[in-house]
Amino acid sequence: MQKPPTATRDRIRAFDRYATETLGVPGIVLMENAGRQIAEAALGILGAAKEPHVVILAGRGNNGGDAFVVARHLTLYGVRPKVFLVAPRHAVRGDAETNLKILEAMDINLEVLDGETETVARHVAEGCETADLIIDGLLGTGTRGTIRDPYASVIEAVNAVGANVLAIDIPSGLDCDTGRTLGPTIRADHTVTMAAIKKGFTNLDAEAFTGEIILADIGVPFTPLLDEPGEETA
């Protein structure tokens, strides 16, 4: 069996450009495909749980957009998720905002948390206390530098709860290329990562944060880029 490809942050960006500019697949279609795969993985994790309590944490970027798609699909499957947007509403743009507007139109349980950091972190902690599953869509592969508030405090609050956590693409706070932590980092039990294994996941220390890694496709083959110089394989 062929080993799955690994990719750096820059390679993932190049792949996204290839999909949208060369193949002509709209970014919102890629987001839809990713979100649906993550929702299906979440359902598998929840198993036969009746009326599960699912909390979805969304940031303002594309990981947040994926999270909004997950919320919609879980709702279609009969799960009633609670969505926390940890960012000002006006900060969400592009495809992520399109999917946020859909959630708002569907009247899904959504709360915008953009107040004082202490209040936001406490609210997240209270919301996650009885969660059967927390879905982390706060920060993505483009994250660099030290994790700052409100994300730092929210991540610490989530880890303190000790619930089952599924990370979207990469646990928030983990560096995509090195697998090192950039500050407080989500300790996920499962990570659904798109298109390719992130290079940082090969760092043995990263396993404590990624948990089980599930490789999902977004409807576009990653293989065309593997022949380019500098591409790495596991």
Image (cartoon, rainbow, N blue to C red):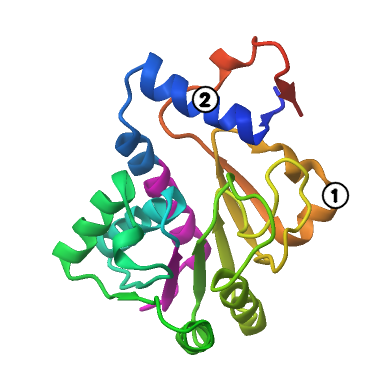
Determine the residue located farthest toward the right in the rendered image: 204
Q: Earlier in the sequence, mark 2 or mark 1?
A: 2
The residue that label 2 is drawn on is 15
Q: Residue at x 31, y 35 (%)?
A: 29
Q: Is residue 211 visible?
A: no
Does residue 9 appear to the left or right of 233 in the view shown? left
Viewer-side residue, 7 vs 152: 152
The magenta stretch is 34-58
Q: Residue at x 63, y 16 (%)?
A: 226
Res. 204 mark:
1
Give residue 185's quadrant in the image. Answer: bottom right
Q: Residues within 10 Å of mark 2 (few under 14, many from 20)?
A: many
Q: Residue at x 54, y 73 (%)?
A: 150
Position of 233 relative to 200 (above/below): above
Does residue 195 appear to the left or right of 189 in the view shown? left
Secondary element at tag 2: helix
Q: Split into 4 quadrants, where in the image is the N terminus?
A: top right
As for residue 53 lying within the magenta part, the answer is yes
